[in-house]
Amino acid sequence: MKTDQLYRRTIEAYGTAAQKDMAVEECSELVNALCKERRRRASMNDVITEIADVTIMAGQLALMYGKEAVEQEIRRKQERLLSRLYEAEAVSREEMLEILDKQREAAV
């Protein structure tokens, strides 16, 4: 079963309201794990587990709200981040243009 199919079935089985609540819970658990890791009370594996949970829930939310719109917004925000890195001289103009070209090719 493909990922989108799995997420759609999950949304159908539990409902959008329950999955939105679960997304909030998983985000909270990630925040908690990051805070605990900073105090050395959680491991890197704890954080990885919570990142995975949030990623799964984000995939379901993207389907609920419009996957293409979410992907477009991600590209827009990545381009903005790349521009900021260029302004901070963390990437060269050539690197920036190369990355932008690859992103645009992947989006097609």
Image (cartoon, rainbow, N blue to C red):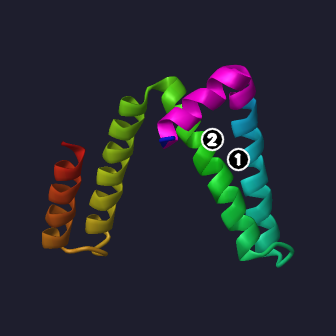
Q: Residue farthest to the front?
A: 1
Name the residue located 71 percent from the left edge and 66 percent from the top edge.
Answer: 47
The residue shown at (14%, 62%) is 97
Horizontal relation, residue 94 to residue 80: left or right? left
Near mark 1 (Cα within 10 A), the count class, few <14, some 14-19 or many ≥20, is some
Dots 2, 1 in contact, CB < 8 A? yes
Residue 2 pos. (x, y %): 47, 41
Position of 100 relative to 87 (above/below): above
- Magenta stretch containing residue 25, yes or no? no
**Residue 21: percent from left, percent from top:** 75, 31
* Residue at image location 80% in from the left, 58% down from the top: 32
Instruction: Characterize the magenta stretch by its predominant secondary structure.
Output: helix
The numbered mark at residue 101 is none
Secondary structure at badge 1 equals: helix
**Mark 2 — residue?**
57
SS for callout 2 = helix
As drawn, 62 above or below 103: above
Mark with earlier residue (2, 1) = 1
Q: Position of residue 81 (x, y in %)?
A: 36, 57
What range is drawn magenta here? Answer: 3-20
Q: Report the residue marked by disc 1.
A: 27
Amino acid type, callout 2: Met
Q: Position of residue 39 (x, y in %)?
A: 83, 75
Q: Is residue 94 above or below residue 101?
A: below
Q: Is residue 21 left or right of residue 64?
A: right
Q: Say what amino acid the circle numbered 1 marks.
A: Cys
